[in-house]
């Protein structure tokens, strides 16, 4: 399954209807499409922007084919970022534009995604010598900027540090503060974050739990 967030509204691109997706289909505010062509791709993009629509489901045997078609109809921007942990017990969060977030940023020309992720994390939080681990997730969300309808594709990596280094928020990127947060104390922070960031944090904490059991 692929997922794109239009603001807080999820568009599920799936090859089968799972019980979780079926719950959305029983809501009158969900748009459902099961025919794939250029017209239905444009329709789902338009419908997801209507205020009365709260979710979308696009059913097709090839999820990637639908995703690529949506990319072609929006302005794609690639970005990368990271979930940094120390000993699997403390995570690095930033506070930007009224929400708790994870450090990330746009890909520079000629840069690869892994290098971008490390650079952005270190620039936005003031840490150094972060160690890159596994790719956690790729998330998608849309927004409007300077007359363009943008689809941001963010590659999220798990990262680690040997110790909780002092933090310096990058204020010119609208970051008000950075904090080391114990995994056991994440709940109140996750009540005020973007849904895509919440998913990344959940994936990361699950990966850290599994690593401790090995």
Image: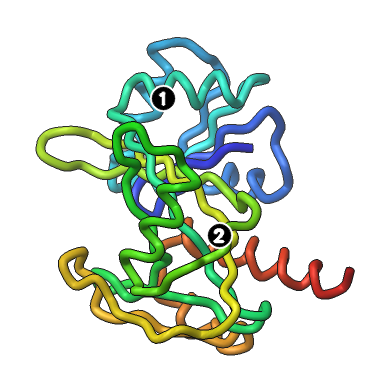
Colour setting: rainbow
| Residue 55 vertical position relative to residue 163 in the rendered view, above or below | above
| Residue 103 vertical position relative to residue 53 in the rendered view, above or below | below
The number of numbered discs placed on residues in the rendered structure image is 2
Location of residue 94 by image quarter:
bottom left
Which of pointers 1 and 2 indicates the residue nearer the eye? 2
The alpha-carbon separation of the residues under discs 1 and 2 comes to 22 Å
Whole-percent x, y for residue 157 in the image = 56, 55
Location of residue 163 by image quarter:
bottom right
Residue shown at 32%/67% (left/top)?
124
Q: Helix, strand, or loop for circle 2?
A: helix
Q: Helix, strand, or loop for circle 1?
A: helix
Residue shown at 58%/49% (left/top)?
137
Judged left or right of residue 58, residue 214 is right
Disc 1 target residue: 70
Mark 1 or mark 2: which comes first in sequence? Answer: 1
90, 161: nearer the viewer: 161
Judged left or right of residue 144, residue 31 is right
Res. 29 in view: no
Judged left or right of residue 214, residue 30 is left
Local crowd size for mark 1, using a 10 Å CA cut-off: few (<14), some (14–19), many (≥20) = some
Whole-percent x, y for residue 59 in the image = 60, 27
Whole-percent x, y for residue 9 in the image = 41, 50
Furthest residue toward right: 214
Whole-percent x, y for residue 207 in the image = 72, 64
Q: Quadrant of the C terminus?
A: bottom right
Mark 1 in CB contact with mark 2 (< 8 angstroms): no
Q: Quadrant of the N terminus?
A: top right
Residue shown at 63%/57% (left/top)?
133
Disc 2 target residue: 200
């Amino acid at each position: 399954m692929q997922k794109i967030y239009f603001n807080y509204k999820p568009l599920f691109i799936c090859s089968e209807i799972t019980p979780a997706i079926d719950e959305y289909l029983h809501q009158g505010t969900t748009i459902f499409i099961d025919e794939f062509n250029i017209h239905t791709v444009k329709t789902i993009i338009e419908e997801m922007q209507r205020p009365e629509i709260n979710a979308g489901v696009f059913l097709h045997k090839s999820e990637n084919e639908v995703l690529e078609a949506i990319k072609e109809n929006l302005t794609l921007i690639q970005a990368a970022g990271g979930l940094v942990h120390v000993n699997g017990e403390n995570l690095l969060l930033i506070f930007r534009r009224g929400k708790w977030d994870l450090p990330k940023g746009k890909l520079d020309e000629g840069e690869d995604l892994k290098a971008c992720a490390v650079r952005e994390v270190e620039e936005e939080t003031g840490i150094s010598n972060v160690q890159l681990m596994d790719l956690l997730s790729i998330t998608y969300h849309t927004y409007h900027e300077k007359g363009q309808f943008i689809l941001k594709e963010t590659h999220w990596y798990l990262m680690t540090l040997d110790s909780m280094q002092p933090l310096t928020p990058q204020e010119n990127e609208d970051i008000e503060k950075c904090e080391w947060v114990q995994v056991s104390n994440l709940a109140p922070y996750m009540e005020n974050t973007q849904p895509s960031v919440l998913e990344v944090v959940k994936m990361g904490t699950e990966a850290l739990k599994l690593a401790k059991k090995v």
